């Protein structure tokens, strides 16, 4: 199993009253697993805990209870032993790229960080072509690119070290509809060609169902239902049904 999340909890202190020690429960006993090569979508409304869960999986935060395992190892230990093998693309592409770097430097950033010495120029050019951009873009700066182009650059950087696990945290939500479609098609093609395991976190259910093998619904920090994308009409939970019927009309 590539990723296993087992009975994970996390809470934060409530702000606004320094005299009370109340806590806000954000993730409440979440458990799920993702097989190697699988693409799984995590959907839920704003405030449901999606981004908090992604930070736990990425090792940015630590759970209060429970465990997160990658290939059977605790996440922080796995990351140390497998540098560059888990990568992420965030929603805010404008702050994800150093504005002082040229595109070639942005894409090659991880390769340099992980000690690659030779062939970086050729690798970067290959990545630029893989994400559907012209090679001429290599000498430009982030502010000279459109939103879609810059997010492609961020994706190129994310896949530069051939990661086993790719987390897409609202990676298309800041883009316009036509650009979203192009980025989704890019991710779909990369998923097949690179055999990556992908966790696609989004509030856009249509994007998730188009891209993913399986969909998990998160509400109030809990996974309330999960189902294969091909069996969405079989969803039983009322909240999940409401999300589905807001974007998809099923035939009776």
Image (spheres, helix red, strand yellow):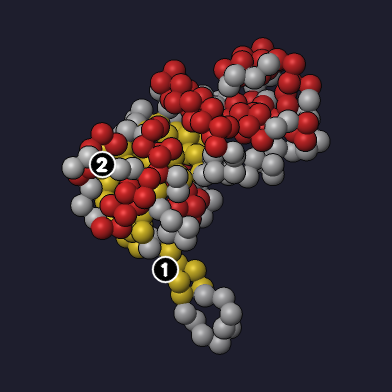
| Mark closest to the chain's N terminus, 2 or 1 | 1
The correct choice, above or below, for 167 with respect to 64 in the image is above
Q: CA distance from mark 2 to mark 1?
A: 34 Å
Q: Quadrant of the N terminus?
A: top left
The x and y percentages for residue 236 are: 20, 52
How many other residues sit within 10 Å of disc 1, few (<14), some (14-19) or many (≥20)? some
Where residue 233 sits, quadrant-wise, is top left
Q: What residue appears at the point 45 percent right and 67 percent down from the top-left corner?
A: 11
The correct choice, above or below, for 179 with respect to 135 in the image is below
Compare residues 37 and 95 and report the one nearer the observer: 95
Compare residues 105 and 238 and report the one nearer the observer: 238
Q: Which residue is mark 2?
A: 250
Q: What residue appears at the point 40 percent right and 53 percent down from the top-left corner?
A: 44
The x and y percentages for residue 96 are: 66, 41
Q: What residue appears at the point 41 percent right and 21 percent down from the top-left corner?
A: 192
Q: Name the secondary structure under disc 2.
A: loop
- Is residue 20 at least partly visible in the picture? yes
Q: Which residue is mark 1?
A: 25
Residue furthest out toward the bottom:
19
Compare residues 11 and 200 and report the one nearer the observer: 200
């Amino acid at each position: 199993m590539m990723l296993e999340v087992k009975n994970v909890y996390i809470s934060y202190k409530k702000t606004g009253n320094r005299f009370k020690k109340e806590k806000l429960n954000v993730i409440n006993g979440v458990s799920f697993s993702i097989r190697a090569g699988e693409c799984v979508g995590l959907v839920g409304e704003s405030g449901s805990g999606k981004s908090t869960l992604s930070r736990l999986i990425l090792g940015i935060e630590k759970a209060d209870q429970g465990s997160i395992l990658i290939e059977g190892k605790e996440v922080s230990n796995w990351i140390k032993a497998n540098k560059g093998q888990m990568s992420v693309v965030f929603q805010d592409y404008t702050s994800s790229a150093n504005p002082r770097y040229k595109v070639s430097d942005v894409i090659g950033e991880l390769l340099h960080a992980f000690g690659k010495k030779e062939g970086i120029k050729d690798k970067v050019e290959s990545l630029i072509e893989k994400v559907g951009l012209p090679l001429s873009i290599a000498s430009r700066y982030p502010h000279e690119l459109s939103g879609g182009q810059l997010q492609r650059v961020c994706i190129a950087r994310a896949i530069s070290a051939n990661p086993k696990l790719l987390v897409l945290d609202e990676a298309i939500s800041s883009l316009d509809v036509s650009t979203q479609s192009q980025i989704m098609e890019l991710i779909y093609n990369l998923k097949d060609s690179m055999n990556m395991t992908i966790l696609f976190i989004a509030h856009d259910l249509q994007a998730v169902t188009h891209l993913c093998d399986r969909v998990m619904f998160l509400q109030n920090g809990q996974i309330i239902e999960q189902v294969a994308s091909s069996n969405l009409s079989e969803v039983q939970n009322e909240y999940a049904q409401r999300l589905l019927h807001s974007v998809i009309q099923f035939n009776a």
